[in-house]
Amino acid sequence: MTFWPNQIRRSLTLWYVAIFGGLLVAYICVACIVQYWQLSEELYHAEVRDIETVQGLLYFDKEGKLSLHEDYFNRPQSKLLVDRMMEVLDAEGHVLFSNSQLKANRLGGSPTPNEGVGGFTPRRLRLADGTHVLAISHVHSLGGTSLLIRIAYSTEPLRLRTFELLGLLGLILPAALIAAGLAGYRVAGKALDPLEKMAQLTEGITARRLGERIPVRNPNDELGHMARVLNELLKRLEESFASLRRFTSDVAHELRTPLAAIRNVGEVGVQEKRGVEEYQDIIGSMLEEVIKLSSMVDTLLTLAHAESGAIELHRTIFPFMEVASESAAIVGIMAEEKNQTITVNGDSGIHVWADQALLRIAVVNLLDNAVKYSPEGSVILLSLEAEAGAAPSAGFVELDIEDEGPGIPENSRQRIFDRFFRLDEARTQDADGAGLGLSIAKWAVEANGGMIFVKPGRARGAKFCIRAPVADGSSDNRS
């Protein structure tokens, strides 16, 4: 087993060791600082006790010279004189007494204002010979003379003790980091094991096994959330593959008919010799089927570009009645061939915010569908309403296209907009469409932020409804 099996585990371990090491280094620094401060406090209190002792040992001899009772101690090895540095000054700053440990150094210059008055004044000094000391000062009165007593001890032992602690903790640090790295590696491994198992399960899911799902142990933690997201992704992929299979099957079915017709016409045409006019008729029939194929391919390409977002919308504000009237005029020629009447009613002052060309495509396709499946002599009604009774929210206008055709069963109203979907009743009426017009109409309306649906029409007829966003005062600022 290698120590670094993957990048995530290594990164987690390194982060853990780095954070732990940083905290440990901070702890070592704080510990050393605290120890040095505690030793300094102990030294300060020792100097206070020492200066209180010294006050009782000072005296003026017969010649008026300040001296110290050195015979106070019974055992010389217990004397505080060993490390003590001491000097005594009068009020004018003259040195009255200085012990041998101080040598030629001074514990500061002239007395500072209020130095040692009413208590003990601590100071950190660096002597002339480079020694660092902690000194305290105290004012004492002896025989009516005001004396400033200064006592100091070297802080070198404090630093040595602190460095010893730092070295000891520094020796422990590498072992602690190695132990933290091993522990972090194991913890990261246990944390990532469910993710690795999830990856193994996902790798086993193929196009033929999209129905499988990743088990969710705890839906409330991060891994459970990841499993739910992957399951939703698999669900969408499964639906997309199913839709693709249906689409491929439908395309193959729709292409088979015109291709079979072209082949049959061609085979019949070459079976025997014919005249020029007969060959022209045969070629004309084949060209009609080719035109149908080309139209179907162009429509499929349009839908593919639309779904990929390659078509850019150009929204403007325009009267919805203008699109309804133009669409009725375009389809009017087909309606006249069947003696049908297209009636347009509505308020010409209603404006919408949409791509006019796309919305016209939707209305034309719906009208073409109504003309195609309505009987001869029927009436197709276009009505524009400012407020639809079933409007889900304000700010929409509804255009209804109602025909007198066979109608659409309620259980087929959702699938009617699927590609290549055609009702059985429609197939019996010699309709030559490919079943893509309603799909394009649905995309054109929804691309403009609208809705398209089917409601029951008159008698057996169908009513297609387009709901588009109405223009308001903020429309000019829309992009």
Image (tube, helix red, strand yellow):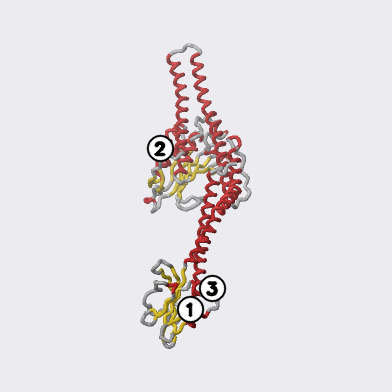
Numbered tag placed on residue 51 in the rendering: 1
Crowding at mark 1 (Cα within 10 Å: few <14, some 14-19, many 20+): many
Circle 2 SS class? helix
Residue ID at (42%, 40%): 358
- Please state which of residues 375 and 151 is positioned toward the viewer in this rendering: 151
Give the alpha-carbon distance from disc 3 to disc 1, as whole Å. 19 Å
> Where does the image place residue 146, in percent across and percent down from the top left?
41, 84
Residue type at numbered disc 3: Gln
Left/right of residue 283 with respect to residue 240 in the rendered view: left
The answer, for residue 89, to whether it is visible in the render is: yes
The answer, for residue 135, to whether it is visible in the render is: no
Numbered tag placed on residue 226 in the rendering: none
Q: Nearer the viewer, mark 1 or mark 2?
A: 1
- In this view, the residue farthest toward the bottom is 144
> Where does the image place residue 64, in percent across and percent down from the top left?
41, 85
Crowding at mark 2 (Cα within 10 Å: few <14, some 14-19, many 20+): some
Q: In terms of image quadrants, where is residue 131?
A: bottom left
* Residue behind mark 3: 77
Nearer-N-terminus badge (2/3):
3
Give the alpha-carbon distance from disc 1 to disc 2, as whole Å. 116 Å
Nearer-N-terminus badge (3/1):
1
Residue type at numbered disc 2: Ala
- Please state which of residues 119 and 263 is positioned toward the viewer in this rendering: 119
Nearer-N-terminus badge (1/2):
1
> Where does the image place residue 161, in percent across and percent down from the top left?
51, 64
Crowding at mark 3 (Cα within 10 Å: few <14, some 14-19, many 20+): few
* Residue behind mark 2: 329
- Please state which of residues 454 and 141 is positioned toward the viewer in this rendering: 141
Residue ID at (50%, 19%): 265
